[in-house]
Image: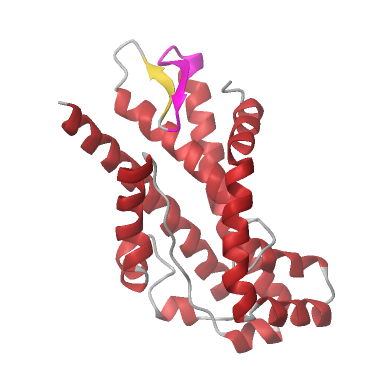
Amino acid sequence: MAEANALAVGIAWYVVFLFSTVLHEASHALAAKLGGDDTAERGGQVSLDPLPHIQREPFGMVLVPILSFFSGGWMIGWASTPYDPWWADRYPHRAARMALAGPLANLLIAVLAAVALRVGMHQGWFVSDIQSFDHLVRAVNGTPQALAQMLSIAFCLNVFLFAFNLMPLPPLDGSGVIGMFMSESAARQWQNTMRQPALLMGGILIAWLLFGKVALAVLLFALELAGLR
């Protein structure tokens, strides 16, 4: 029974992870296309079909999420969207908007999940019962607990994805978003600096270490802001 329950929870996590990650990357791809770069569109990334995204990053989209769930009880992973560096160099502000599109997709999912949870609590379908990332509310009055679980995961995971990806360290989206607040020439220089291999390697390590120290505080703040705590 416990194994069956763990499997059901794992499936719920993976469904939400897959949708959230695919929407994140598809938003990057769509923003690039609208800005004049069709590289991702030609690769099939302007789509909610997970297959092109999984084919591009099978390790980050399949293996790591499964391993992270069984080792820590929640899922993490990654995907990527191809773009033309020449286009980004020529249009650094468009590239910055492309970088912002992914985290905004995660913010949208988190907001919609929060609204659904609040409506459910108001209607008497859920009651607040924060126990873990996948159990923010308890289903009552015949409401399926699976629905409460999926919405809980969608809120927590997307808050984390939004906040983590906006950290201003390469290769995270936040390092690209900074270019929106610079002149085009300064943004171009910033972009080129952020692409240095040493910064890419060090940036992700520093971001992971720093986020581990603030992740819970970020989630608690989001819960308060959404009226779920």
Q: Residue at x 38, y 26 (%)?
A: 148
In the rendered structure, the answer to whether residue 217 lies left or right of residue 126 reads right
In front of the other: 89 or 202: 202
In front of the other: 140 or 219: 219
Q: Per the image, is 132 magenta?
A: yes
Image position of 50 with respect to 84: above or below: above
- Residue 82 at x, y = what percent? 48, 77
- Residue 108 at x, y = what percent? 56, 45
- Residue 183 at x, y = what percent? 85, 75
Q: Residue at x 32, y 47 (%)?
A: 14
The image quadrant where one finds the N terminus is: top left
Image position of 44 with respect to 127: above or below: below
Residue 94, picture quadrant: bottom right
Highlighted range, magenta = 121-133
Q: How is the image coloured?
A: secondary structure
Image position of 56 with respect to 222: above or below: below
Image position of 111 with respect to 130: above or below: below
Q: Tell me, yes or no, if residue 139 can be seen here.
A: yes
